[in-house]
Amino acid sequence: MAAAPGLEGTSTNGSGNNRDRLSELAARHLVQPWPVAGQIGDEARGLIRSGDGVYVQDEHGNRLIDGPAGMWCVNVGHRCKELADVLYDQAMALSYNSPWYTMSAPSAELAERLGKLAPGDLSHVFFTTGGSSAVESALRFMQFYNNVRGRPDKKLILSRGGAYHGSTYLSASLNGRPRDRDWMDGADHLVVKLTCPNPYRRPEGVSREAFTDWLVAEFEATIEEHGADRIGAFVGEPVMASGGVIIPPDDYLPRIAALCRKHDILYVSDEVVTAFGRLGHVFASKDVFGAQPDIITFAKGVTSGYFPLGGMMVSSRLFEELRRSNHPDAMYAHGLTYSSHPIGCAVAMKNLDLLEDGLLDHVREIAPYFLSQLKTLEELPLVGEVRGIGLMACVECVADHDSHNPLRLDTEVGQRIDAHCQDLGLLVRPLINMCVMSPPLTITRAQIDEMVRILREGITRTMADLR
Ligand code: PLP
């Protein structure tokens, strides 16, 4: 792969020094996301120099497949000239406008386009800077909505074990993955946690159907226990992404959506990962899972990671209720300096063109191959299950293949596999005992073969380490 413009000659020979210098700068001054206390200052994170298509290039000039597409976001692939051109052109035309008292053409045009693409009557969009701020906006909207309607007690939020919804205070309070909350505070008095709908971890001897019935019954019992008049929203990812690509049983989401509607609980579908092509559709809630939300949150793939943008789509029914409320002067006092950013919105428009111009079809066509090839890894004794949908998949490692016994958390198998794979030419996203794969949507069959071959070798080497 050619070095990206501006990086020629800066890369690898002699880059050892450059790398050492950058690591030192980072150690002294850069707080990396999700740092571990005892390692702050001496944690070495790999230096990525450039990207092209499904590949990135590391500091040694090695070409690696970007298995997680950054963080589930580089959907159209790296170094996409069309997006880069739009970014540049929009910055030169209008780099910023205050969303407080002005608006830009790209934001209005994107809002209209998304309103047409979103399911049902989700025809209004509020733009944010990413996923956490999208979820936070949705939750604050629910609070506002219920205050205006004269239901100030209807504020509890239902979330689930295994969920990840962000890193702002309220969004992070919903998180349910191991470790996320061990050392962090949250608005616990506002959140009720439900069971993770993970069919692989359902109780032994229980069918998928009976497991679904049990989850739905738990949902109903929770409403009964806390009272529908105190529950404002249910927030759920259609497929739990960072929790390990957990695909709920078939009719779980439609049944939960129906219960929400029945009890006047807003169903917030967190599509930060699943929207914009990952599952072969612009939005997945309705098209893939048959569930109609009241609010959809999105981010990441909306600009393929080329610009930080997120947002929430809101049902026009809710806006109508607000318009007709007894408090016409009530203000949803919520906005961000970078809401409706013109560059982000312009990039998102072009990104949508690319998705609609063949990329969504490509995902639908290639996804079965992606999953069937990854599934072959289930032959390996360390692999308990490979599951996936669209172009997102998870390889879950277990201590015992037959009993599904989990591995000890401190084995960090995902990290071991990732380290081996990096040596071999593949980035994977390690999650304790799991590896998540969500490559750029442009991936070809040959690149899938390469990815699976390397992953197999990485797992095999890890098995040898653990022996
Ligand atoms: N929601 C989901 C489902 C996510 O996966 C993430 C991030 O991975 C977020 C919200 C938070 O998004 P961001 O990191 O852009 O704030």
Image (cartoon, rainbow, N blue to C red):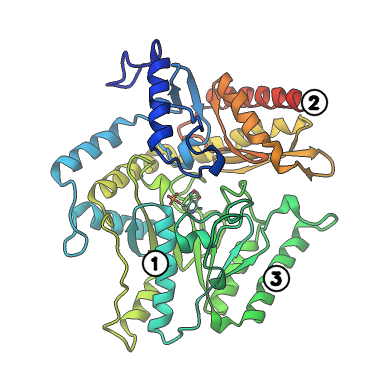
Q: Residue 326 at x, y = what percent?
A: 33, 89
Q: Is residue 267 left or right of residue 7?
A: right
Q: What residue did someone put label 2 on?
A: 467
Q: Is residue 173 left or right of residue 327?
A: right
Q: Is residue 339 left or right of residue 388?
A: left
Residue 77 seen in this snapshot? no
In the rendered image of this protein, does residue 206 appear above or below residue 358?
below
Q: What residue did someone put label 3 on?
A: 218
Q: Residue at x 54, y 35 (%)?
A: 366
Q: What residue did someone put label 1 on?
A: 314
Q: Secondary structure at mark 1?
A: strand
403 or 176: nearer the viewer: 176
In the rendered image of this protein, does residue 262 appear above or below residue 362?
below
Q: Could you tell me the amino acid type at mark 3?
A: Glu
Crowdedness near tag 3: few (<14), some (14–19) or many (≥20) residues, C-alpha within 10 Å: some
- In this view, the mark in front (2 or 1): 2
Mark 3 and mark 1 lie on one chain; the one further toward the N terminus is 3
Q: Residue 210 at x, y = what percent?
A: 78, 63
164 or 412: nearer the viewer: 412
Q: Residue 363 at x, y = what percent?
A: 50, 39
Q: Residue at x 67, y 22 (%)?
A: 457
Q: Is mark 3 within 8 Å of ligand 1?
A: no
Q: Is mark 1 within 8 Å of ligand 1?
A: no
Q: Could you tell me the amino acid type at mark 1?
A: Val
Outermost residue, left side: 93
The C terminus lies in quadrant = top right
